């Protein structure tokens, strides 16, 4: 069993929020002799032969001051600043994850996964917010990449994070998992959906379970959370006791949903070749949620 | 002691997500003989003499089809559709809460508070997203007010919810509360801050406590959540055990921070006129969090 730490978490970077708005401090960081710049392949991570992220020396790039606005300060590690370039992606195409990105992710350690996730979410946010939602004016990055300001109405815009609830319904010692038609054959995972304005986490969990599977939640407990960088979700993982195990599946959302016993979930987590279903990848919070449900005492 | 239910929660509306994209179904709802439209005074709630929200009959308004795009479907109550008008507010001024709104909120019951909160968040979101962040084109409301589409590049935009962590640090049986200089005299509340891309809830709690008060979290537990409609925060309320009670206050964020005992918090919650501090309002999740901390066994 892998330790109970959701993917994309565990970064030891100091995000140095207090420096972002301080132009002199950022200029100093850009001149730091060990300042590092994250290398990407398109928007996927570049990897060393050992499976780590690749960093370039910022000094060697000899960036002029005019280019500093195109860098995002990811944070400091032992005082050394780490940046990523603010690549623009096409306004037409959202930056979906590539098969290569998903493959590469499973090779990264927690720190690198968290660093890449943060970088990716921010780059994507910049690409989707080049214009001001209020007035349509062009926006310009500022605060070391942690904001954009409208060049016309001067509105400030801050990176967006979308809360998503992801949950197991629980009834009679079994957990409810579902699958979407587009997923790899045999894969089942927790149900999930975007939280809407005006909802608590607990209300969103109950609504999604009812909409997608027709089950009524009587109690919801929060388990853990994860940042999911495609593009910038906050995954809020919960377990909901439901009143009845009769299902009414919304076939627009789910191809199938099944109740699984702890033994069946444990078999899948243990890598049993005869397991009844294929797990979500280890870096998905659904995997952590299943671990927690399967072994609640070991995964607090 | 009031029951442990955070403000703006407990709506019994069916949000009817499955109908939003169905133009024929929405047209039917608009023609429903009992369809209701929420009345606002500016962006504040209008109130009946009994302190309830005011609803107008939609039929009496005799809206043409061309006006249906300016209504947001809040949901169904016993099959009766409830709408709010999509008022545009000035692009220059964000829609901050007025003193009157805060006064009125304390008069509303949970259902009305939740309904108003949802309406307010959505109206504000529409006002701040009249143009496409990707291409600068004008956007048009669709999906019964639960989305906007760019008239140029056809990008879809969905209502934004910003996760915020709000937390009590806990050490030696005492809880840490702080105050901002702009608050009413004597008021202390939980520390809070926006969660950033790439962070878990638990990481954001630890970062904010360290940034604002210099305390190091060793364990974070989630307590409850709330939708806060000024304009659209998801408040994630937590308690964090910290390693040491020595404070290093960020005076840009906080005017003061103090450690308070359970007895001191209970006295404030019980309305003791000699209580050491003034509580946040009952509809703020900080109030629920303090209730939970003061009486953990009664507020599960």
Image (tube, coloured by chain):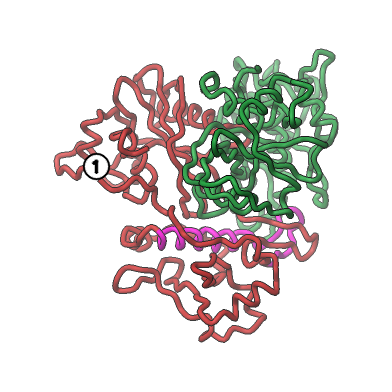
Chain colours: A green, B red
Q: Which residues are magenta?
A: B111-140
Which quadrant holds residue B224? top left
Examine the rendering and report whether any part of residue A15 can be seen.
Answer: no
Q: Residues within 10 Å of mark 1 (few under 14, many from 20)?
A: many
Residue at image location 56% in from the left, 27% down from the top: A16
Residue at image location 84% in from the left, 14% down from the top: A49
Question: Would you say A262 lies left or right of B23 here?
Answer: left
Residue A80 on the magenta segment: no
SS category of the residue bearing label 1 = helix
- Quadrant that contains the C terminus of chain B: top left
- The residue closer to the viewer here, A222 or B143, is A222
- The residue closer to the viewer here, A51 or A103, is A103
Question: Would you say A257 lies left or right of B172 here?
Answer: right
Residue B116 on the magenta segment: yes
Residue at image location 72% in from the left, 51% down from the top: A253
Residue A26, horizontal then vertical, whole percent:
62, 29
Give above or below for A247 relative to B222: below
> Disc count in the image?
1
Q: Badge 1 is on which residue?
A: B269
Residue A273, horizontal then vertical, whole percent:
79, 22
- Quadrant that contains the N terminus of chain B: top left
Question: Would you say B185 lies left or right of A270 here?
Answer: left
- The residue closer to the viewer here, B24 or A290, is A290
Q: Residue furthest top?
A: A50
Residue A242, horizontal then vertical, whole percent:
53, 44
Instruction: Output the chain of dot 1.
Output: B
Residue at image location 35% in from the left, 68% down from the top: B52
Which quadrant holds residue A211? bottom right
Give above or below for A245 relative to A225: below
Q: Magenta segment, principal secondary structure?
A: helix
Residue A140, horizontal then vertical, whole percent:
69, 46
């Amino acid at each position: 069993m892998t330790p109970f730490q959701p993917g994309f978490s565990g970064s030891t970077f100091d995000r140095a929020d207090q420096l972002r708005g301080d132009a002199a401090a950022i200029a100093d960081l850009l001149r730091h002799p060990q300042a590092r710049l994250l290398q990407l392949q398109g928007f996927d991570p570049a990897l060393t032969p050992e499976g780590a992220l690749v960093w370039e020396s910022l000094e060697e790039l000899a960036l002029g001051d005019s280019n500093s606005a195109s860098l995002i300060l990811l944070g400091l590690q032992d005082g050394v600043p780490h940046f990523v370039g603010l690549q623009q992606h096409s306004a037409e195409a959202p930056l979906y994850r590539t098969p290569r990105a998903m493959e590469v992710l499973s090779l990264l350690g927690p720190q690198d996964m968290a660093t890449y996730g943060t970088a990716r979410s921010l780059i994507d946010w910049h690409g989707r917010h080049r214009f001001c939602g209020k007035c349509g004016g062009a926006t310009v990055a500022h605060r070391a990449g942690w904001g954009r300001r409208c060049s016309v109405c001067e509105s400030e815009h801050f990176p967006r994070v979308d809360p998503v609830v992801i949950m197991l319904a629980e009834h009679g010692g079994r957990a409810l998992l579902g699958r979407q038609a587009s997923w790899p054959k045999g894969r089942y995972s927790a149900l999930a959906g975007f939280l809407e304005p005006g909802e608590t986490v607990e209300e969103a969990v109950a609504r999604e379970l009812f909409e997608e599977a027709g089950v009524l939640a009587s109690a919801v407990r929060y388990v853990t959370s994860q940042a999911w960088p495609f593009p910038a979700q906050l995954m809020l993982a919960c377990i909901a006791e439901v009143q009845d195990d009769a299902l009414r599946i919304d076939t627009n959302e789910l191809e199938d949903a099944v109740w699984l016993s702890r033994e069946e979930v444990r078999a899948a987590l243990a890598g049993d070749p005869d397991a009844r279903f294929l797990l979500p990848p280890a870096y998905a919070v659904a995997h952590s949620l299943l671990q927690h449900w399967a072994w609640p005492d070991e995964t607090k």
